[in-house]
Amino acid sequence: MAHDFSVLFVCTGNICRSPTAEGVFRAKVKAAGLDGRVRTDSAGTHGYHVGDPPDSRSVQAAKSRGVDISGLRARKVGPEDFRDFDLILAMDRGHLTHLSRIGPAGVKARIHLFTDFATPPHRGREVPDPYYGGTNHFEEVLDLVEAGAEGLLAEVRTRLGA
């Protein structure tokens, strides 16, 4: 199925932050009636968890806010992603640097920090890795992801004229 716009969310292992962002944004896109027009996916900068589902704590935290990410599976960013996605969104500055370094020439304009789309006070903040933290860390990730997803949806609507 062809889409009018595509977004890839990227974190380290693709089991906490980026699948959460993908799920939250996908739900917002669907609620806006744009699900047939916007493609979403997520990936990791490293292949530590390829094929694995999201961390159970991420699944539970997202579920508590009405978002099901249990069916997602981790994968590693590949060369084709730089060709296939309109926006590639990093969860932190380390991911941003990594993506800029491995991406082919001419793609830097499409690689951004995810929270650059959020409104203050969330704009430009890194989405922290909750993996070694408690439940409150996963809630913090969701707060930042929801703020970023709202702003990103506004940007996508503008780009699509919707």
Image (cartoon, helix red, strand yellow):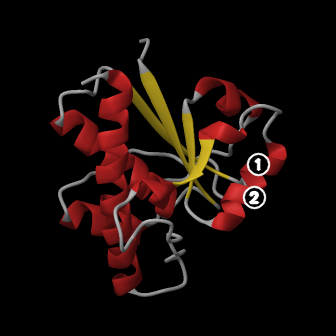
Q: Estimate the spatial distance between the alpha carbons at disc 2 and disc 1, rounded to whole Å.
A: 5 Å
Q: Nearer the viewer, residue 113 or 141?
A: 113
What residue is drawn where x is 33% and y is 31%?
158
Q: Amino acid at mark 1?
A: Ser
Quadrant into which the C terminus falls: top left
The label on residue 70 is: none
The vertical placement of 149 against 134, above or below, is above
Across and down, in percent, residue 57 comes to: 38, 72
Q: Which residue was labeled with disc 2?
A: 97
Across and down, in percent, residue 5 comes to: 44, 25
**Farthest top residue in view:** 1
Across and down, in percent, residue 68 comes to: 27, 51
Across and down, in percent, residue 147 comes to: 32, 61
Q: Is residue 76 left or right of residue 3?
A: right
Q: Which residue was labeled with disc 1?
A: 100
Q: Nearer the viewer, residue 131 or 99?
A: 99
What residue is drawn where x is 25% and y is 27%?
34
Work out whether residue 144 can be spotted.
yes
Asked which secondary structure carries label 2, the reply is: helix
Tag count in the figure?
2
Given contact means CB atoms under 8 Å apart, are the residues at marks 2 and 1 in contact? Answer: yes
Q: Is residue 102 left or right of residue 144?
A: right
Q: Nearer the viewer, residue 64 or 49?
A: 64
Q: Is residue 158 left or right of residue 112?
A: left
The vertical placement of 35 against 133, above or below, is above
Asked which secondary structure carries label 1, the reply is: helix
